[in-house]
Amino acid sequence: ITLLCGFCLFLPSCFGRCIDFFQFTLMLFLIKLFFSIPQGQLSILQEKIDHLERLLAENNEIISNIRDSVINLSESVKDGQKNPEAINFSQGSFSELLPSASSLLAVDSEDCLFASKSGSHSSDVQMLDVYDILPFDNPDGGVWKQGFDITYNENEWDSEPLQVFVVPHSHNDPGWLKTFDDYFRDQTQHILNNMVIKLQEDNRRKFIWSEISYFAKWWDGVDTQKKDAVKRLIKDGQFEIVTGGWVMPDEASAHYFAVIDQMIEGHQWLEKNVGVKPKTAWAVDPFGHSPTMAYLLKRTGFNNMLIQRVHYSIKKHFSTQKTLEFFWRQNWDLGSSTDILCHMMPFYSYDIPHTCGPDPKICCQFDFKRLPGGRISCPWRVPPEAIHAGNVQHRAWLILDQYRKKSKLYRTKVLLAPLGDDFRYVESSEWDQQYQNYQKLFDYMNSRPDWHVKVTTTYFLVYGENSTKRYSILSGLFFDRMCIAFCILTLYKYLIILCNSRAAEILYSFALVQSSKFEKMSAFPSVDNYKLLTEARRNLGLFQHHDAITGTAKDWVVVDYGTRYYKYINLNLHFLFKFKDVLLQDDVQASQDALPRKTVIKLTLQPRYLLVHNPTEQERFSVVSVTVNSPKVKVLSPLGKPLTVQISAVWDGATTVSREAYQISFVAHVPPLGIAVYQVLEDENSEAVLADYNIYVRHSRQDNPDTVFKIKGMQNSVDNIILENAYMKLWFSGMSGLLEKINTKEDGKNHQVKVDFAWYGTTSNRDKSGAYLFIPDGDAKPYIFTDPPTIRVAHGKIFSEVVCFFHHVTHTVRLYKVQGLEGQSLEVSNIVDIRGEYNRELAMRISSDINSQKRFYSDLNGYQIQPRLTMSKLPIQANIYPMTTMAYIQDVGVRLTLHSAQSLGVASLKNGQLEVIMDRRLMQDDNRGLGQGVQDNKITANVFRLLLEKRHGTDVNEEKAPVSFPSLLSHMTSLFLNHPFIPMTINADSGVPELINTFSPLMSSMPCDIHLVNLRTIQAKVDTKPSDEAALILHRKGFDCRFSNKDTGLLCSTTQGKIKVHKLFSKFRVESLTPTSLSLMHSPPDARNISGINMGSMEINTFRIRLR
């Protein structure tokens, strides 16, 4: 259970190292296309732009004035002057002003109602209440060890027979104990080959399949005859695709962007190649289940879903209440539009011994692969018997007894009995063993009307359609509280942040339209790049697999996931990137498991071009830092104006300054989804401001004068280290360098906010912590350092920072001295190295004076916030939860949010405290199937933002609500953290003509609460070409208004979820826009071309869009 990149994905966070070169190739192409086209075409383009400006000028002015008036009235601005930052980029008036210190955020009052109403509609079953009442004990339940004894009356089915649907399946992990390719070669291809043969032998045979990553690989290698046979089997109802995503994704660590992306990839592949639309979702192996997944499935078009891995105490409770089947509703849903019928499997596993009924000793006897003489047997030492005329009555009655007992846990007389396990049905003999023996049992049971049962192998859909009883409405989530896989594989989850596949998708869509517009398709290799993009999507999707992003795979399998992206980038550059010798990445990765290193830009008197891409849909001022070879530097804005620049040292270790490189930092202003071109050049008369340094060590040393920087040696002291900007003042310990206190200047209040580190060990009992389990030996022990760490303090014009060098972690807190969003939170980063440790897990802990009362909040998949309650009746491991993008604690006056650029485990074990587990090193297997510990640790980076906000107008009943929402400022902080500016330089020897100004594809910022999830070019119906359509995916976020909207630095407003599409793009015309389901599988019956979008809060909507 852990987060996002497949070497990439990751947090929407995310998503980019994989295709950095690709996206910047697109940047350059767009810049060249817009600013370097032939003079004749340029004149035509200019005329069109002038005409467009004349047509829009009056409306733009009216809208601008109305907007300013609303801002002025709602916020009572004294001067009533126009907000200078509300730039309409279509007019070409690109402002370079920094955000005003008095800027106000315009929020429509209607948009504040959703958060206040959410959670007011009660469900029949609220999981927070269930967790509260359950004792989470584990008494011996008899043959059903974690359940209870089940009895029934034999006459119960006289009036309504029991219907049993046996569902043969094979769960194929795209990597676990073997790599994806090894599994395919050794097992998966044989399963699918035999499926085609064996299903055709008897039309009563049925089979389901889930993982399209494997199915697509198999499909590409088989002949037309087999493909036609598969299509016939699907048409006849013998073979069914369930879920149909690229993988069966993890539901705790994966970001919703990545979950949607792999779902689209699978469904698009199915539509194009097989012509099938899955109707039912099937998730038997992810480590817990998120309501986010239920929502995404519902919006994809599913009405039924199945889940399996839920804590045994919950399964037992649901079994007693007969609520194993329920309508799963979102906590925030004010109606019932998110309801999806969910079937929860009641027993321990999805294997055959745990699916026919409560007694695994009996059920194992009906796994006919375990017949005597085979390679596997039943652990209960009672083998199966081949079915024949002499034993069919006894054997049929034996399994019917299990079916009946299992059915007593449900409200209907319709029973689902899966028949499969991991990588089953490889050999032709197993198909015969299972199908032939079960057919004899079915024929006999169906011939006995006095038994009142009808048994068949049929697809899962019939199960849902034949269930007529009323189901409970459930809201909440299911995560196995003992499992902590979401705390590992942090290096790859961090790299996901750098893997901006979303940026590449959007830039590709723009470049494709623009190249067609100017008949310059030959200049842009759209087909080749689309193949690259498709491969990147699939590698990203593969990493969302529940044994990939979680780190619960063999070491060499994890390396394979990383190598796929790394080799894929480097081996294809010469083929895919026409401009590979032109663009230089800001970050370079030496190997698949290494942290990126900065590229050093070599300066001359001639300017080097620095392209800065803003991957967010908001106009944005953010700090850009790049590395150059000289401190004598000047940076020019897109309009040629000199910018304020901070020069910082690049360090070799804690105290040695590099003479080869210097970091320059400046505030870049880039339009939404746009590109700004800055110039960097060497200048002997540079006015750049040098950072000053104080270095604290145990014993003071003589200052060693540096030729460039002012560096002062200091002795560790009890005196505090202080940093401050316009918003806050920070105090750090002079001994440890760790944060101790924050003063918020808006109200002058001091807040105790202390950062420290702690170690968890593992228990001495037989069951110990491993890849899946977290079983500590008690409370975490403080991170003890015998000698004070070296502390390096930087004071600069753009930012100041404190860096602490501990043995296992280099900890940095950076405070930006800029107006607006970036100045209102702290950037916290850790470089972690625990490779020399033995059975230890390192946590970062934040302790505050906030009276959180055992409650905290963490996000689910970057999509929604889930309230948590730390329960004293549960062990430590049961109070740690997954965090994909943020977690917070609060009281009536303050909220403290930890924003994260990678998914980790988070807890609040004491009042006012948050802690995250940053890395784990465990020497033993935890007996969950992996067969190894966690010893493949790498040097790992974790990046966070710490945001302290003042609350007002709180409700005393709020703490009991099952929902919570971030503020708009918090949403934007997370967005900017997980979608940082992407800088790229142009090679000095490239011969590229001069580039000018900016690329601004949008008219202006989108509404503050609407996030552009993706603009994903859709595949053509034939071949591997892109079509002229894209999937426009939007998410309207729910937000809490009870926070200050002054000086947020946000240059947007809210609009009640309404967008006028013809005013969205500045460089393109919307030719058509039609609503569709989330993964493009279904279109509404009344689908038509629309000119406006109207979204409800929290909704994610997809539209087919054609731009010209």
Image (cartoon, helix red, strand yellow):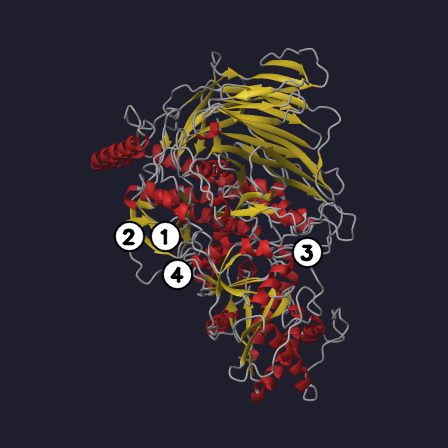
Considering the numbered disc 2 on the image, is that residue within a helix, a strand or a loop? Answer: loop
- Name which residue lies at 53% across and 82% down: 161
Return the residue at label 4: 1082
Q: Please report whichever mark, 1 or 3, sits nearer to the chain's N-terminal start.
A: 3
Q: Please, is residue 213 above or below residue 745 in the view? A: below
Amino acid at dot 2:
Ile
Considering the numbered disc 3 on the image, is that residue within a helix, a strand or a loop? Answer: loop
Q: Please report whichever mark, 4 or 2, sits nearer to the chain's N-terminal start.
A: 4
Residue contact between numbered discs 1 and 3, judged by CB atoms under 8 Å: no
Q: Please report whichever mark, 4 or 3, sits nearer to the chain's N-terminal start.
A: 3
Amino acid at dot 3:
Leu
Return the residue at label 3: 177
| Rendered location of residue 987, percent (x, y) | 49, 29
Q: Please report whichever mark, 2 or 1, sits nearer to the chain's N-terminal start.
A: 2
Return the residue at label 1: 1103
- Name which residue lies at 75% across and 43% down: 839
- How many residues crowd around disc 4 within 10 Å: few (fewer than 14), some, or many (20 or more)? some
Q: Please, is residue 1031 above or below residue 166 in the view? A: above
Quarter where residue 969 is shown? top left
Return the residue at label 2: 1090
